[in-house]
């Protein structure tokens, strides 16, 4: 039973409307039924709701409970290494989700990131490797602007390693800028030595932005508008990876501002159309998620 609950179902997610309706239907107690049918901005998880409603708890047997719980969903992580360096090896960059639970009860620890944090050498991790979307494939022959925050750096570390390997094999590279946001140089600037070595070799131009210094990637893009605009003019592709809540909208706005400021007569609507066209052409590609 422990294995079943640990490895096969979601235990810390909030209930959806269908799950609440199923609980209400199973609940023999009218006041509980009314409470379950109430507004669903409740921060409690499904398991917490069941624990808080004694009548429904008594009415649910194990099969009914297992039917109700969502099967464990796979979590996605970007491979942060390059098969050109070692085809038998894959690195990941994981950020542990751990914070006081919104329900006010204890700590919310992410299922996937928590599991991977606890993995020890020799353990088996159940995973499969999926190729990235074709549109996210970063070619060495076209100029590129990479923008990331936090673990969004993962695919770009792989791309920089690809470029470093290509350079060592004598391939001529188009320019690449890599903007990435982290807290501070000595806190979470992961793989700094490797990335600086790649920069020295000519594989990338690194543009870190440190939030403890009050700078986010979109600020640095705005401050270096000339460099970015020049690459855009040369047909650069832009890739944005990581936090979808604040970074990605901020970066979109930085690019729209760049266009507006450098295009005579362009207004907000024209900037919006310009960015939409780049997205439609696959020249502005986002891979974002809740950080
Ligand atoms: C294409 C892609 C690539 C990705 N690459 C990476 C990567 O390289 N590295 C990386 O670290 N992540 C990456 N992610 C994110 C990753 O897949 C997971 O979403 C992340 O690790 C969190 O999963 P988890 O299982 O730890 O958390 P979960 O157990 O899934 O918990 C997340 C859920 O908990 C909720 N929640 C958050 N905080 C609280 C709180 N305080 N109280 C209550 N509920 C809360 C959230 O709203 C969310 O619904 C990627 C995602 C995608 C889609």
Image (spheres, helix red, strand yellow):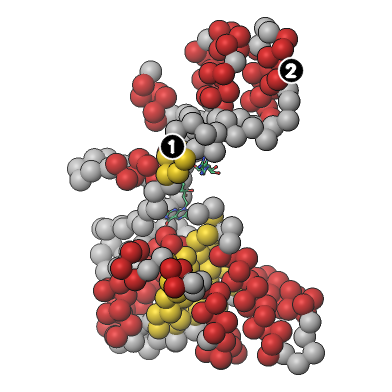
Q: Where does label 1 land, which residue?
A: 107
Give the class, few, some or many, for how many residues have Cα within 10 Å of label 2's Cα (few <14, many ≥20). Answer: few
Tell me what residue is drawn at x 29 percent, y 85 percent.
201
Q: Residue at x 42, y 75 (%)?
A: 208
- Give the residue displayed 37% in from the left and 68% down from the top: 184
Whichever of callouts 2 and 1 sits on the residue coming sooner in the sequence is 2
**What kind of element bears circle 1?**
strand
Q: Position of residue 144 (x, y in %)?
A: 49, 80
Percent position of residue 246, x then y: 58, 62
Instruction: Measure the C-alpha gap from mark 2 to mark 1.
Output: 29 Å
Q: Which residue is mark 2?
A: 34
State the residue in front, 38 or 164. Answer: 38
**Where is residue 194 drawn, in percent x and y?**
27, 73
The answer to whether residue 24 shows anywhere in this view is yes
Report the side of 192 relative to 46 (left or right).
left
The x and y percentages for residue 262 are 68, 90
Along the viewing direction, whichever of 101 and 50 lies nearer the viewer: 101
Q: Horizontal placement of 265 versus 109: left or right?
A: right
């Amino acid at each position: 039973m422990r294995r079943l609950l640990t490895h096969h179902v979601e235990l810390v997610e909030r209930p959806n409307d269908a799950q609440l309706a199923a609980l209400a239907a199973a609940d023999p107690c009218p006041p509980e039924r009314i409470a379950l049918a109430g507004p669903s901005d409740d921060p409690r998880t499904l398991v917490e709701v069941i624990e808080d409603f004694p009548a429904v708890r008594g009415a649910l047997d194990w099969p009914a409970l297992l039917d109700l719980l969502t099967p464990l969903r796979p979590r996605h992580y970007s491979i942060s290494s390059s098969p050109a360096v070692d085809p038998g090896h894959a690195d990941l960059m994981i950020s542990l989700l751990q914070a006081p639970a919104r329900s006010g009860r204890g700590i919310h620890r992410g299922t996937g990131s928590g599991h991977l944090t606890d993995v020890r050498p020799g353990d088996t991790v159940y995973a499969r490797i999926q190729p990235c979307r074709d549109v996210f494939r970063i070619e060495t022959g076209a100029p590129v602007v990479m923008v990331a925050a936090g673990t969004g750096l993962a695919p770009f570390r792989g791309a920089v390693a690809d470029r470093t390997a290509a350079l060592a094999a004598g391939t001529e590279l188009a320019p690449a800028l890599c903007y990435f946001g982290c807290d501070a140089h000595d806190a979470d600037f992961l793989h700094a030595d490797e990335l600086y070595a790649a920069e020295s070799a000519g594989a990338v131009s690194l543009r870190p932005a440190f939030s403890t210094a009050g700078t986010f990637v979109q600020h640095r893009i705005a401050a270096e508008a000339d460099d970015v605009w020049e690459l855009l003019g040369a047909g650069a592709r832009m890739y944005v990876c990581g936090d979808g809540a604040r970074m990605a909208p901020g970066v979109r706005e930085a690019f729209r501002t760049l266009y507006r400021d450098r295009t005579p007569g362009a207004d907000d609507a024209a900037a919006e159309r310009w960015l939409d066209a780049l997205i439609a052409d696959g020249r502005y590609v986002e891979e974002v998620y809740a950080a």
